[in-house]
Image (cartoon, coloured by chain):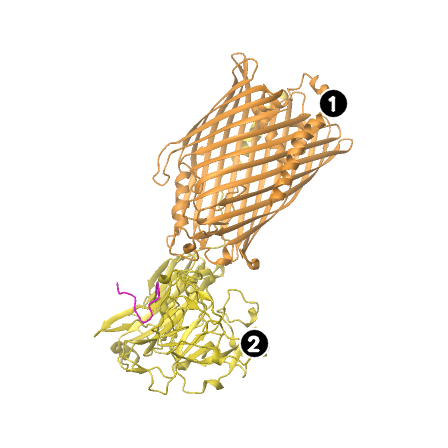
Amino acid sequence: MQRLILPIFCCILLALFAASSCRRELDSELKATTLEVQVSYDNTLAINYSDQYTVQLKNLITNQVDSARTDADGIARFDYVSNGKYDIQVTKRFSAAAYQQLFGEQVDSEVTFNAAATSYQIGISGGSVTKLTLTLRRSITGDWVIKQLYYAGSDLYKAAALRDNFFEIYNNSDKVLYADSLCMMFVYGRMSTTYRAADKLLESGQFDWTKAVGTAPAASNANTDYLYAQAIYMFPGDGKSYPVQPGQGLVVARSAINHQAPFTNKNGKVYEVSRPDLTVDLSKADFEVITTPYLEEGESASLIDIPTPGKKSLIVIQKFGKTMMMDNIGRIGYALFKAPADMGSWPKYAEVKESTIEGKTLYTRVPKKYIIDAVETQPNTADRRLPKKLSAELDAGFTFVPLGSYSSQAVIRKVKEIRDGRRILEDTNNSSNDFESIMPAVPGGFKEIK
Amino acid sequence: MTIIRIIPICLGLGILFHGPVLLAQNNTAVVPAEQNNRSLPDSSTRALLQSMLRSSNYALSKESSVLLLQQDMGKQISISTLGYQTERGKYRPYQEAEHKRGAYFRAEGGKQTAKMLLWGSFSYSNSQLDSIRWGHRKDADFTTPFYYGSQRAVHYQQTDYAIRTHLMHRLTQGFTASLSGDYGMGDHFSTNDPRAVLKHFKLRLTPALQWKNKQLGIEVRGLWGYGQQESQVDYRNKEYYESSQYPEYLNWLINGYGTMRNALSFSDRVYTNNQDFTGGGLAIFYKHKSWTGRANFNYERIHEEYDRGNSSGRYDGYDMYGDYNVDQWKGYIELQDVQQHWGIRLEATQSEGKDYNIELLGNNYAVLRRAAVLQLYYTLPLWGRPTQFNFRQSFSYHNQVDGNMLIRREAGRQLANLQLRHPLNMRRDQLLELGITYSNPYNTTFSESPRSSNAFVEQVIKHDVALDKTNYWQLQAGFQQYFRFAGMQWMAYIQTQQLQAGHADALLGGRSRNQSSLSVHLYF
């Protein structure tokens, strides 16, 4: 028996040895899916899909962009789509003649339709085929466009920090326009990726303004027909005071001074600028925004909100903070509008998590029908991006400065063409396509056409 | 932090250098009884260092079983080791350094009496990695789905401390109870961009009950522990902050096997991996007059949760990325003759991990590692001197999947190794070691998404898949010199291994790797 111990033991070992080193299949719950994007229109028109539509799919984890064309049924198919978050968009441009032929409506210029789904989550519940419908909406186009947004600011210590913020509007038409009473609105919405009142959010993750308390009851169309203003600044004038020629713009500075020179605040403290190349000279800006006159009685003013001699300020309809604050991270939207009505009577609402308006910051409800142009900005990193504030007909995409806060970068509208010496800017109402970044910002200028 | 480091060092050194010596002085009456028993093999520490079978038994038992350690360590043991090792060569996994060097100090000692056993060890190691890519995380415990990485090569330095203790006390006739503690901590950091700091610690406690008589012994044990790893990534040069314009410097959070997300935003730069350890084990021995059989099995579940915060607010508003469970089974059975002239052992391990990824709302990453090692030990007289032979045959299998990136990578590897240790003189104070290894792959399959790829897949995974498919030879040589110095017993050990891959692959960049070490051991 003793002699058998070793052979028996070895046999057991060999059996275990063979069993313990063999291969085995592994599985993951996440599986690739086929994404079918149905492209449709927001009206009952029968569309001929023989004119193919290109759907773009951008993976927000890998930043990889794919595209697929629709078939005869208007469906674009993407195979082997991984789980994750995606931006999906489709843009269709019609020449005036083509638009008239298809829709029966006479127009003067090109018409753009946009549809988009941003941060669209493809998860394990989707199954082997995930279906999505994108509804094309005719973009709102106007003669005025937002041309440049310099919200990121420049180096905190070597340049001007956020004092050098500015925005620029542009006459993209072939006729003289008047800036009088034109308003720039900073569009408010979710500012953080987490929110404690989840029950007061829409499926998109954006605020459900129908649940907000305000100076008037929230309307059922509070989310679809309105935007909510963090701040509103209006150009002065009596209607014909500020003409703008075709291909010209107006620069509105936070402070219309040369930021490349040292800055002295109201207390006499001097801020040196050791890297003037990182900031801009705004002494030639057309307007600035001075908030101090609009502060409540007893409210202390900002030390940097200093009027520049010879410069006019926009009228502050609604203030946010003690000086014009363009969100340096890029979490707000910008909209140009012109309202016939008295804006002072428009209702205002507190953020949806609030149960009272007492002592809370209120946001003015602005009807979308007055919007002339709108641009959504977002943080530069995908994981910090927020649910969209602007719907597809206003801005189907978003823009951002790649280097983020204090980077000296601005976003500027691309030049589509130069006609008779006049630069016509891109305006498809999709800022992902229409804008590009520039460093440093060029107040009144353009990015070189490559 | 300094105090936290110093206390365990002092405790460790105090126990290990003075404890065993003092205990030995107080219990000298117990030792001669065994020394007079000539039927048993030499249980001295020197004999343990010289014997391949005994030292491997001791190495296994001190990791897990007090019952078996009691059989392997002799009445007392004390070994202090100071060493230096270097590893160089381009034949390596992509995330490993091309040149790695490090110094280490280990001290371990134990003493057993009729009523109790006390054993403790302390180890310190410091490694310098010339450059690593895609891995701001170099703790070798096990693979986890979350860690930082960048394409930019960073110089890495890591310092690790570990203390392990076993305390066993007799309860009644045949019954004993023991408590084992395992504490480890460390700092790893790189100083060039992107900079990273990794701090980790873990504490594991193993209570156990033993019953034994002269022939049979059984141990049942449990495991409870917790640990934490905290990684923080930052930049020295501000232009790389929150920028995707410098792709080489861009930090990614690898959250699967091939899935990655950029980790630029401020709030992402600190993440914490909280770990819980639970499990249990069983050990058994049976002694016959001519042979001994032993077995040891261990199960452990490691549960990990990943939280992120930021470096200023730290955990203010942190998010949880997901959690991860790893089930580990380890075991071995062996048979050896009483004189330990021969032995046969089968070791088997399996580790299976699965995550739940909160961002992707499902289980994305799964990993399976299996290994089986069959070892034969035999002592044969050559030129009148006992020459030890060790044949080792192993099969290891590794399967990793990432559902999001549709990665499937399987890699099997067999390895056959023959090693001998031969005394160069009759005093047996000079021992020569020689060894040869051959390894070749099996079951190597790889598939990826036809639609999407990324830099991690292209650089890391495809490199490692090429490595999976290579075969290689390895030669090893070593030399042990035993001597007395300053009235104490020492051993110097030098060892080198040269690996040469059978074929070159353009992705690998090299075919060879050398590992060498030099160490001095003080033993009692």
Which chain is drawn using orange?
Answer: B
Residue A132, quarter of the rendered image: bottom left
- What segment is highlighted magenta in the picture? A437-450
**Which of A317 and B144 lies nearest the eye of the viewer?**
A317
Q: Which mark is residue A448?
A: none
Q: Residue furthest left?
A: A420
Counting from the top left corner in percent of width and height, residue A15 is at 54, 33
Q: Circle 1 — which element? A: loop
The stretch drawn in magenta includes residue A444? yes
- Residue A285 x/y as whole percent: 35, 74
Residue type at mark 2: give it.
Lys
State the residue position of label 2.
Answer: A360
Q: Up-down: is B502 above or below A101?
A: above
Which of the two residues, B191 or B131, is positioned nearer the viewer here?
Answer: B191
Chief SS of the magenta region: loop
Closer-to-camera residue (A339/B500): A339
| Separation of marks 2 and 1 at Cα, in angstroms | 82 Å
The extreme front residue here reads: A268
Name the subunit of mark 2. A
| Most foreground residue, B381 or B135 | B135
Q: Nearer the viewer, mark 2 or mark 1?
A: 2
Can residue B257 be seen here? The reply is no
Q: Residue at x 51, y 31 (%)?
A: B84
Q: Which residue is mark 1?
A: B30
Q: Is residue A339 visible?
A: yes
In the displayed structure, does residue A446 sit left or right of residue A227?
A: left
User: Which hue is chain A drawn in?
Assistant: yellow
